[in-house]
Image: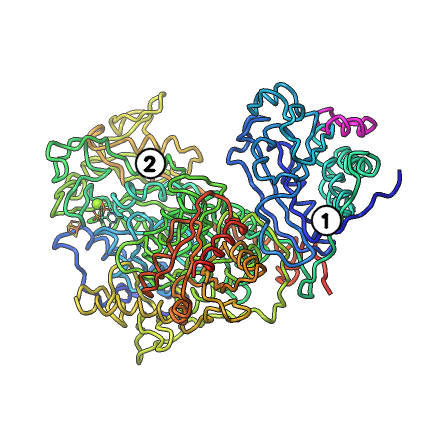
Amino acid sequence: MSDDNGHTLTAKDFRTDQEVRWCPGCGDYAILAAMQSFMPELGIARENTVFVSGIGCAARFPYYMNTYGMHSIHGRAPAIATGLATTRPDLSVWVVTGDGDALSIGGNHLIHALRRNINFKILLFNNRIYGLTKGQYSPTSELGKVTKSTPMGSLDWPFNPISLAIGAEATFVGRAIDTDKKGMTEVLRAAAEHRGSAFVEIFQNCPIFNDDAFEFVRDDKEGVNRIALHHGEPITWGADGEKALRQLPDGTIEVCAASEDGVLVHDSSHTEPSLAFALSRVTQGTHGGTPVGVFRNVERAVYDDLMAEQLRVAEKKRGKGDLAKLLHSGETWVVS
Amino acid sequence: MGIKPVEQLSQVIVRFAGDSGDGMQLTGSQFTSEAALLGNDISTLPDFPAEIRAPAGSLPGVSGFQLHFADHDILTPGDAPNVLVAMNPAALKTNLADLPKGGTLIVDADAFTDRNLQKAGYAQSPLEDGSLDEYQLHPVPLTTLTVGALKDVEGVTPREAERSKNMFSLGLMSWLYGRSIDPTIAFLEEKFAAKRPEIYQANVKALQAGYAFGETTESFAVTYEVKPAKLTPGRYRNITGNQALSLGLVASSRLSGLPLFLGAYPITPASSILEELADYKEFGVRTFQAEDEIAAAGAAVGAAFGGALAITTSAGPGVVLKAETVGLAIMLELPLVICDIQRAGPSTGMPTKPEQGDLLMVLYGRNSESPVPVVAARSPSDCFDAAIEACRIALKYRTPVYLLSDAYLANGSEPWLLPELETLPDLTPTFATEPNAGDEFLPYLRDEQTLARPWAVPGTPGLEHRIGGLEKADRTGNISYDPDNHDLMTRLRAQKVAGIASDIPELEVDDPDGDAKVLVLGWGGTYGPVAAAARRVRERGKPVAHAHLRHLNPLPRNTGDVLRRYEKVLVPEMNLGQLLQLVRAQFLVDAAGYNQVRGVPLRAAELADAIEALVDSE
Ligand SMILES: Cc1ncc(C[n+]2csc(CCOP(=O)(O)OP(=O)(O)O)c2C)c(N)n1
Ligand code: SF4
Ligand SMILES: [Mg+2]
């Protein structure tokens, strides 16, 4: 697809001359490759695209994308991108963050960005570990995780990033898997089309400090563990599509046979977040399957648009700001 | 009723004090307007309680407003009032110590009830026990008189009638000092006439009744006149520091042609800048009330990356939180102005009170070698120029700049000679639009003169680049761990900031006769009291020189020369000697400090004595 300038872009155009410094086998490579081949599809010129990140292995991402980019400070990327997106609505702004970056030090910025519905896309590379600082447990590590900083196991209950985002009033929430290029591209495409904040959790393998954390879905050729969510379609999975999800009157979700009555039909556009939230509670451990795809995708006023609108209204009501008039406003007097 | 004699005064300091609910701030600011429109020079100092609604009648609930007006140019709101208007016993108790013996004391006699006396900790009424004999005491039953005057105004509750007593006191004071109450009537009309006509009526009636009371009562035998001051000709308006600072930022946006973006989180005494700027949307001003100060600063950095004039405002406890982001802006070499409206004390301290305790924090409160230019405003109206100067440096040198003000400048006011727009500097930055090294774009290739790097904003084709907090290679901006490169970059960042010294005015010395041996060196918000103190010393026939720093980093290039020219140097500060430490370390001069951290502006009289003692000690 050609971009704003009529150029035809390819994945190669999005590569930089910087040597990629992730460990061999790191899931970040697959995400980068998927992103670089997906970007041309958007038809947005490279100069109008900006990647902003915090700190962590994941946060190195902008160095490898031949667009504008900022590798900022730990946890603050959503805040920084908020200033950029609200002053420059003409740009396509992407935030890349890790589970520690987004959910620990930057948790506050993440939830507020989501509730404001700033027009940017947040990609959270979840490896359930602190990679860059060499292997301490993270806010998504399972309880009892043994790491260098938790030799007897971690004591804190983890966040479920999808539940958190939905609870934070996110208008778009999705999940993808680093190695699943097709699935990830679908989610990214929907995220890019969404106006407002789009939050995408990407399961990312860290072979060095938390290898195989997502093995059950990463290497799931038969589809026995991935529950692919598609808007408007019944939620079924399994090698032969024999398993399905069904919602109980109390809102919780149970597994049933695909042939049974009451199989849940996915509705990502429901204004109420209850279903999306219930789906976010479906996990490998509790239900024997892991939903991937778009959980929630609804429209709501976008902060940047509302701000621009207030500026327009003020100018319409008061006229374009006149500095001389402003300085001379209020009671003035002349000394001669 | 005969015409009472008029006594001429060259200056008067009035303090209104009352319960937070008594409307003292409004009374004070209206009296200020009346004085300003009459052509007096003025200087004001509001004194708010930190509590929003402390219990009525209690000592912590007292709110005050001091106004100094004169027939000549004045520099401070005055050390001690000549007249104290106390609306209740608590206000009397907390303010009496400041009123010199013989001063005029006007109190609301009705408010001296047993209950109020008890709340203020008086065992018996000071109006009756002779303890106020040394003052010119005027106990006026303000409440009764006000309620009486309003008995015919329909739709006003007794409580609302009572609350108009501040207007009665304003009317009385206006009469006493020969001020027209017309501006206040106009103000009340604009504020209330449409929405609450009965409140408008009540206020105007109370105001007029107060004025008439002055004419008829036996209590006051004379009235006073303070003639207009001879100020520089031009159009003036009364302005507080935070208003002036806000206007300076809007002006900088216009002068640079860049949209203004403010990231802020509410904090006293900086909040009113956020509130003020939020109301200038027709100027394209975007204000972002962030979730915290870190986000506020971060959003500003993001806006700067996108080509906006980026500002973040706060006070000490919030500025601390911004430190890491300022470090990022130093590495990114993007323009950012961080306004620190200093308040007293570590931690939460005394939020509504001024101090100069943040100087060393803004200079050094970051990891590693991270130089930041620092500009400090010297008076309420000077906040306008200081804001423009901070923006100028930030934009030209692509650097974060700290702008220091304080709680006194923020809320204090003075007449401001309105500037001609043509005299303001052009701040238009040049954005990079093309490759700067053959067909390559090097984001850290510096301007030879300023050492500033190019500012290439997203949206510019061909200049796509990545920046970040990791150390960069010289010129290319790529990540670099090379030892020599880090050494070079550290020095380059330092040189860039140091080089600004050639782009700021030399330090001026006020030494009228040129024969002073003592130099008083101040900075920022103490300008008024320091200059007033120097004047007093000179009036006593003793020479003293005064220099006042606006730029704290870099210091003006002649600072060392100036300091060495004098036998003695005194550095008055509202901290324990922060600038003092700096000049001693940098210039090896044996300067001495004059330090107070009382949460109130320095007192010119006390400082004058200290300076005189130093002059005499030769
Ligand atoms: C203020 C601050 N605190 C701590 C660090 C150290 N630090 C860097 S990355 C990181 C955690 C990164 O974990 P995550 O966000 O999960 O990213 P990953 O490396 O796993 O991709 C920490 C603690 C820092 N850079 N800055
Ligand atoms: S430490 Fe883990 S997350 Fe970081 S680069 Fe290596 S493999 Fe990837
Ligand atoms: Mg991680």
In space, the residues marked 2 and 1 are separated at their CA atoms by: 57 Å
- Identify the residue shown where x is 27% and y is 56%: A35
Q: Nearer the viewer, residue B193 or B108?
A: B108
Please state the horizontal and vertical placement of residue B165, each as a whole percent of the image.
72, 32
Please state the horizontal and vertical placement of residue A269, each as a whole percent of the image.
41, 39
Q: Name the residue under label 1.
A: B34
Kindly identify the amino acid type of the residue bearing the numbered disc 1: Glu
- Identify the residue shown where x is 61% and y is 59%: A321
- B434 relative to B220, above or below: below
For mark 2, give the secondary structure: helix
Q: In this view, does A136 lie to the left or right of B194?
A: left
Circle 1 chain: B
Residue B603 can be seen, yes or no: yes
The residue at the far right in this view is: B1
Q: Give the magenta-colored segment's residue range.
A: B142-160
Circle 2 chain: A
**Magenta stretch: includes residue A87:** no
- B445 relative to B618, above or below: below
For mark 1, give the secondary structure: helix
Report crowding for label 1: few under 14, some 14 to 19, many 20 or more residues within 10 A (C-alpha).
many
Q: Nearer the viewer, residue B13 or A190?
A: B13
The image's mark for residue A164 is 2
The image's mark for residue B11 is none
Report crowding for label 2: few under 14, some 14 to 19, many 20 or more residues within 10 A (C-alpha).
some
Q: Which colour scheme is used?
A: rainbow
Residue A37 can be seen, yes or no: no
Kindly identify the amino acid type of the residue bearing the numbered disc 2: Leu
- Identify the residue shown where x is 73% and y is 41%: B173
The residue at the far bottom in this view is: B438
